[in-house]
Structure formats: C-alpha cells, structure tokens
Image (cartoon, rainbow, N blue to C red):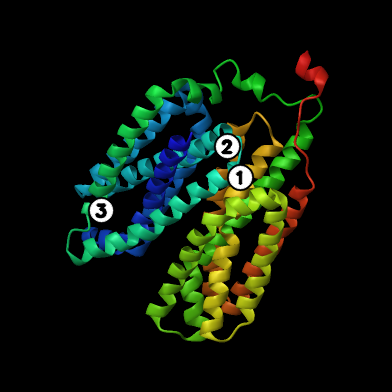
Amino acid sequence: MNRLVWIACCFYLLIGFTSVIAAALLPELLSHYGRNYADGGNLVFAQFFGFLLGVVTQPWWSKHFGRSRMLLLTLLFIFIGYLAIGFLPAWPVVLLCLGLVGFGSGMIESTVGALIIDSIVEKTAVAMSRLEVFFGVGALVMPMLISLLIVSGAWQMTFFAVCGFALILAYFWRSYYTGNRQLLDRHAPADGESTAASALPAGKGKLYASMLAACILVFVLYVGLEMSIVSFLPSILLESMQVDAALASLSVSFFWGTMVLGRLFCGILAERYGYTRYLLWCSLGTAVVLIGFALVTQVAGAFIMIMLLGLLMSGLFSIALVFSNTLFPGRTEQTTSKLIAASGIGGAGFSWLTGRFMEHNSVWFTQWFLVLVALLMLAFIVLLSRMKPIVKDSAAANG
C-alpha cells in the first residue's frame, strides 16, 4: 500500500509540473511565435479547458477502461502533447497539444485522488496531504529548472524532460498494477455495479443535491481564493506598498513554500483533531489573516501574513476532499470528479474577476473582496460541518 501512495505522489508531482510549465514559458513561447498576451491567454485557456474536460469525463473513462489502463492513457496524452510542443510546431498545434496535456492532467488529478480515498482506509487525510506536498514541490521546482534552461538557451528541453518523467512513471505504474490488479480492480466500479453501488436511498435525492452543492461551493471558493492570491499577490504588494518588483515576485515563493511545509503536517493534524475541526479553524484563520494582510502597512508584516496564509490554507483542499467523500459513501469517483471540476472553474472564474477588480478598482477593494471570499468559504464549511453522511436505510440496502 505504501508503494501505491508513493506512485500516486509521483503522479501528483507530474501534474505539479504541468500546472506551471505554460505560465513559466509563456514569454519564451510568445517571443518565438511572435504572438501577444491575448494569444498567451488562449494558450492558458486551452490547457484549462482540456483539464476541465478530463475531469468531467473521467468517470466515463474509468468505467470503460478501468483506472489502471486509464492512468497509462493519461501519461500517453501528456507524453504526446509535450513531445509535439518540444519540436515547436505551428501555433494551432501548440494549442491543441496543450489542451491534450490539460486533459491528461485533469484525469490524473481526479483518478488518483479517488483511488487513494478508496484504497487507504486508515489515515486517508495523511495520504492525501502527501499527494498535495508533491504537487506543491512540482509547482515550486519546475520554474527553477525552467529559469536555468532559459539562461542556457534550451528552454524547449523542458518539454522533453517532462516526457522522460512521464515515460519512467508509466513503466513503474505498469509494473505496479500488473502485480496488484486485484487490489485496484476491487476499488474500481464495474460496468454493471457502478450505478447500483452509487444509487441514492429513496427520498434522499434533494438532500444529496443540496449537500453536494454546498461541497461544490466550498471548492469553488477555496480554489478561487488560492488562485487569486497566487496570481495577484505580487501586484497587490507593488500597488499597496511600493516594493521592489523582485521582492514582490518572491512573495509567491514564500506562499508556496509555507504551503508545502504545511502539507507535511496537515493530514496528521486532521486525523488527530478531526476533519471538521481542522477545516473550521484553518478557514477561520485564513479569513483573519487576510483581514490582517489588508490592514498591515509594513513589508515585513505583509510577508508574515503571506507565510501564515500558506500554512493555514495548505490542507484545506485535500482535507475538504476527503471529508466531502465521507458524506457520500460509494460515490467516490463521481464526487471527486465533480469537486475537482468545480475547483477548476472557481480558479479560472475568480482569477478573472480579481483581475478585473485590480484593473478597474483599487487594491484596497480587491483585498477586501478576497476577505469576503474567505468569509463565504468559512460559512459553507460551517454548514458542511453539520452534515451527516448519506447512507442507505436497511430496507433499501437489503432489498
């Protein structure tokens, strides 16, 4: 089982890489193709659209191919996409291939998350937080590697390097599932069983819909908040404190660094004190620290707030994902897919909205908008903490 977790961590490391490559290489790609930032926006959107499509269609792929073969397919999609981009083809081909990479990444995130939640019975939160650590490490390390390759004039080698990693991972995954097919198949829904296993108890349809809607809103708000912070933190510091551009850009590294640090311990804390208590205290702390960030006037104080934000937000996604799945037993595949799709929409939508606020309103307005998002997230987490799992009544279960 430990080997499964470590291979799953490598999958998350891979999608940590893919999540930042397009943004980190955007200036080089635009310069090479003679494109503008509007075209860059199309590039980012192509990957996001592919990611969303992969997440939404993941249950269908899982049902028809099984998780084992499907994960091999996702690695093939990423390999083909980056291999083609590495040869710097025509711009439309780059857009298409980046969409293919996003498609594979979306399927990996929802599939591996569901697999770990289904397979790891004890200390599920610890296992999920370990995945998030590797995602964060990938998102941190890849820009550093890219900067070295840019300096050496070989930035396109980034794509081939990730292709190599995907091939190595495919080898280890195939070796693992060949010897553990029974374990993986036990947790994957069979064609005829998926509908029956996830059937709702009579009269519980509206309850399920309302509970799922609350979970979806938590993920929309959380990822929207996180992506807004990551995308606009340097700009907020530049506008509000007149700091040096290099120092402002470091703020994201401080945020991600404490995120990774927090993810080392968040699963242990959640298992020890309970999922709901962890989510409540961390979401409350996030709102309080964002208020402090909006009020602070010194650079040192701002960086302290940024690091506290990283620590407090580090486990919200993974612990909320584990807790949400406990509310809907037997529906891990569907629940995980919907929640990760919601997170993608929230990240894109709120980043766009925050950008509009930064452009047309004051930085002060934007900061208090982020506080409002955090407070709304806290309110829905309070609502989630009062919910109980939907279980079949004995009559339905036996009959």
- Residue 158 - label: 3
With 396 as the anchor, is 370 left or right in this view? left
Which quadrant is home to the C terminus?
A: top right
Q: Find numbered disc 2 in the image and state the secondary structure of the residue it sits on.
A: helix
- Which of the two discs, 2 and 3, sits closer to the camera? 2
Q: CA distance from mark 2 to mark 3?
A: 32 Å
- Residue 321 - label: 1
Give whichever of 237, 99 is nearer the camera.
237
Label 2, residues with CA under 10 Å away: few <14, some 14-19, many ≥20: many
Q: Amino acid at mark 2?
A: Ile
Q: Is residue 185 visible?
A: yes
Mark 2 touches mark 1? (CB < 8 Å): yes
Q: Amino acid at mark 1?
A: Leu
Q: CA distance from mark 2 to mark 1?
A: 9 Å
In the rendered structure, which disc, 2 or 1, sits on the residue that comes first in sequence?
2
Label 1, residues with CA under 10 Å away: few <14, some 14-19, many ≥20: many
Q: Find numbered disc 3 in the image and state the secondary structure of the residue it sits on.
A: helix
Mark 2 touches mark 3? (CB < 8 Å): no
In the rendered structure, which disc, 2 or 3, sits on the residue that comes first in sequence?
2
- Which of the two discs, 3 and 1, sits closer to the camera? 1
**Relative image position of residue 243 (x, y in whole percent):** 45, 84
Residue 170 is drawn in which quadrant? top left
Q: CA distance from mark 3 to mark 1?
A: 31 Å
Q: Which residue is mark 2?
A: 117
**Relative image position of residue 146 (x, y in whole percent):** 28, 60
Above or below, 367 against 189 in this view is below
